[in-house]
Image (cartoon, grey):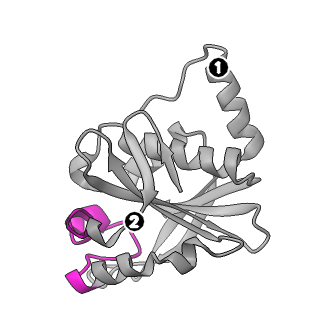
Amino acid sequence: MEKETARLLLREFSPDDFEDVHAYSSDYETVKHMMFGPNTPEQTRDYLEKQCPEERDASPRMHYNFAIQRRDTGRVIGGVSLHLNWRRDDAVLGAVLNRHETGKGFMTEAMRGILALAFEELGLHRVHAVCDVENSAIIRVMEKCGLWREGRMLRRGKARPEAKEPYFDQFGYAILKEKWQANQEETKRGGKEYEA
């Protein structure tokens, strides 16, 4: 399965992506707000090997993990994912982007692409995500993509060992199918598209 956007290809990960994926997954500044990493080479290889045909061919499929590949360079610059719930009408959104590619609108574009997949192709009712309240970059992206902040969850995230406190607060964000559709209609009518 693939999803094309203006500048990106959202596609299945491959073991051949090791160099690009390890470049961001082993970088502390890129993953400091994530629940993984910095990865060792073995951890990155293990992750790529787990993106196996059994998961992709599962029926019903519950997990969609896509590489974010730049169409101009062919480089993998991050990942975006949907993890469906047991009813298959709601999903958790996840995303990571190489910090050297931030500020160019790539994550906004990738997130719009995965939301289009969620609502237009998978027929989901709702997509939600959580993030560190200190992660201002992903907060801006989610709000540009129309996600609504549902609330602040106190001490929900488990902090890294080097942190001063063992837990950190997270924001919860979500978007419903009807909100996504309304945003698309507004764009078609010539309304201002969400800035990249």
Badge 2 amino acid: Phe
Classify 190 as above or below 175.
above
| Image label count | 2
Residue 28: which quarter of the image? bottom left
Tell which of 107 and 1 is nearer to you: 1
Label of residue 1 in the image: none
Badge 1 amino acid: Lys
The alpha-carbon separation of the residues under discs 1 and 2 comes to: 32 Å
How busy is the neighbourhood of tag 1: few (under 14 within 10 Å), some, or many (20 plus)?
few
Using residue 42 as the reference point, say whether residue 96 is left or right of it. right
Residue 41: which quarter of the image? bottom left
**Which residue is denoted by mark 1 in the rendering?**
188
Tell which of 119 and 103 is nearer to you: 119
Name the element at disc 1.
Answer: helix
Residue located 66% across and 55% down the image = 127
Residue 25: which quarter of the image? bottom left
Residue 169 shown in magenta = no
Image coords of residue 187 (percent x, y): 61, 22
Q: Say which of marks 1 and 2 sits in front.
A: 2
Using residue 172 as the reference point, say whether residue 133 is left or right of it. left
Q: Report the magenta residues as a range.
A: 18-42
How busy is the neighbourhood of tag 2: few (under 14 within 10 Å), some, or many (20 plus)?
many
Image coords of residue 155 (percent x, y): 52, 75
Residue located 49% across and 61% down the image = 131
Tell which of 168 and 129 is nearer to you: 129
**Which residue is denoted by mark 2 in the rendering?**
13
Upstream in the sequence, badge 1 or badge 2? 2
